[in-house]
Image (tube, rainbow, N blue to C red):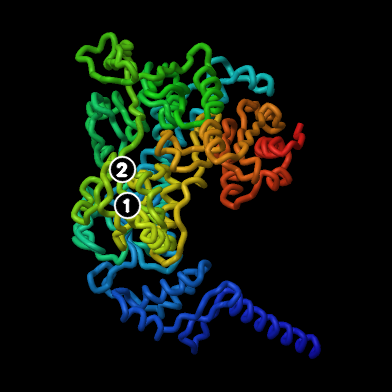
Amino acid sequence: MKNRWALLKTFCCAAAVYVHLVLHFSLGFVHPSSKTLSTSSHIGVAPVSPAAAAAAAAAGPLSAAYTARKQLLRAAPGASLTQAAAAAGGAAATAAGSKDDPYDIAVVGLGVGGHAACLHAKSLGLRVAAVSGGDPGGTCVNRGCIPSKALLAAARRARMLQQQQLLQQMGIHLAPNAVTLDPKAAGQYALGVAAKVRKGLLGSLAAHKIPVIDARAVVEGPGVLSLHPTPTSPADTPQTLHARNIILAPGSVPFVPPGIDVPPQPHPQQQQQQQQQQQEQQHQIMTSDTAVGLPTMPSYVAIIGAGYIGLEFAEVFSSMGAEVVLIEAGDRLLPGVDPDIAEAAKRLLLQRDPERPIKLHTNTLAAAVKRMQQQTPAPLEIHLKDRETAADKGVLTPDACLVATGRKPATQGLGLEALGVNLQRGGFIPVDKCMRVLRHTSSSRSPREAFEGSAAPAAAAGAAAAGAAKGEGGASEGEVIEGLYCIGDANGVLQLAHAASAQAATAVETIAGRHRPFNPRLIPAACFTNPEIAFVGGDLRLALYRGSFRYTEPEARALSEREGFSLGVSTSSFKANSKALAEGEAEGLCKILWRRDTGQLLGCHIIGPHAGDLMQQCANAMAAGVSVHQLATYTHTHPTLSETVEAAWKHAVGFLSH
């Protein structure tokens, strides 16, 4: 028995030593008697002593805690919050957000991008606060991505249950016309999902002790925000907030062309207080912000704009029994999407129901949308004109109209003019590739021109020196405003919620002294119709002369001719996918574009079931720089929808897949 106890004690001691060593060498261990942060050499973290931090703070306007954190974060790309806090010496805030104790970062706007900025800053050990503007969650959570996807989920299930022939083949029998979709109940479900997501967003900030201030912010000067009450602001809301860095994430609002009278959008928290008449007007001429939660479904709806917002709502309205017509200024459905994908979408989405197809007018402008005084023959008149000739193309008389013509930045009233910021064409805030706001740029430039003409911090000095040697100007037009950043829809680089999240990480990493420029080429996008449409790959420079930055086949072919390489194009069909056949969803295709000389993926396009999910493996492959030759050797689970992508990769290198 004695021997057993001795062995057990020896084992426990050895285990304790082992755990101590693992913590010391793998995670970075701070001994209680030491004030120096010790980290493992294999992750390249240099120790940061309090003396060094204090000396650095004395040399500049930053606090010792901030400087210590920034030193660590610059030296250690993998540094954690615990390590950064230890490096800061545990300094506690006394009056956070005051002039004497400013935050490291103040985030203006609390949509998806603002939320991501807060969490990433907290992860890096930076002190951060958010100013919500009375709209936590922003457009995506409250009025856009989330509730619209809930509506699309209801529409998808309704369509599935209405496929009598397929259901009978599966042995499922429903009475004809037994399935209906109640627009009011579906809208309540969508708003309920949005409320859950909004609650989760605020809950995550509270869990990490990130303060949220319900106010509207105006930039008064470097590092200074004046705060103004919203309809929901508490009485004790502060009037001023100080921060060493400000990240603007004000988002966007629907763009409404001239000639269309859309009722004003109330404050998000006041929507429930609208009068019934106001609600009816709101739902007669709608935007994507007001189309969720319809009390009844109009029998005939016109949608101005056939991009993915318009197409998603066409899917919802059609599933609810409405007759739908799309009005598109471009020459085809889904401008900017690969032509083969757009043609497949036209067949699978618009012509799916022979008895009630979705009609499409291309090269057509809605010159005016008017409310009729009488209720006959319909409450609205939409006057159509040819985009090129301005010739009259007739009048539509729908019961309701949805305006889905894009979004414009919510940048008015931010106070940027006082800092020398010239808003770009369309009102966008000019930024460089690290999301730093630029002053003294030309207001005639597009936001993508400002972005593409900028240099990242690490390259700026070298580019400027090279330009000087050649007798040229600086690295880019515009001067960086230190400590001021803009992410998301308001900078106009790429108006997608997940792009805003990626830009948030770029801005915070730049503040922390680390180089991580935003790369729009690697950002996928999706249209959540049934079937879904998704794509990835592109170059913003394409948008400067072709209108779209995505590498569709025509754009990729033009690039190959300019640069002298051979373009590879490979496709695969969901009709050859076992899982798609089993689920009765075998319509669609996957198309990849690549360079034959290097195997580099240029772009990928999918229309088919769960295309948005399938696209991520292509986006990840592009981000990792994996060639199509390597991808063709990877094994996918069978049977899964992902094998459709695998088949396209195999076809690219001459392998048989069927």
Quarter residue 4 falls in: bottom right
Q: Residue 579 at what x, y percent from top left? A: 69, 33
Q: Amino acid at mark 1?
A: Glu
Q: Is residue 198 above or below residue 341?
A: below
Q: Mark 1 or mark 2: which comes first in sequence?
A: 2
Residue identifier under label 2? 445
In the image, what residue occupies the spot 43% across and 18% down? 360
Quarter residue 257 falls in: top left
Quadrant (top left, top right, bottom left, bottom right) of the N terminus: bottom right
Quadrant (top left, top right, bottom left, bottom right) of the C terminus: top right
Front-most of 149 and 257?
257
Q: Is residue 280 left or right of residue 319?
A: left
Residue identifier under label 1? 477
Quarter residue 463 falls in: bottom left
How far apart are labels 1 and 2 at the CA level?
10 Å
Q: Is residue 188 above or below residue 123?
A: above
Q: Amino acid at mark 2?
A: Arg
Q: Secondary structure at mark 1?
A: loop
Q: Is residue 499 above or below residue 29?
A: above
The crowding category of the residue bearing disc 2, from other C-alpha atoms within 10 Å (few below 14, some 14 to 19, many at least 20), is: some
Residue at the extreme top: 377
Residue 87 in sight here: yes
Q: Residue 273 at what x, y percent from top left? A: 24, 37
Front-most of 388 and 154?
388
Q: Residue 286 at what x, y percent from top left? A: 31, 28
* Residues at circles 1 and 2 in contact by the CB criterion of under 8 Å: yes
Q: Is residue 168 above or below residue 220?
A: above
In the image, what residue occupies the spot 41% across and 53% down? 433
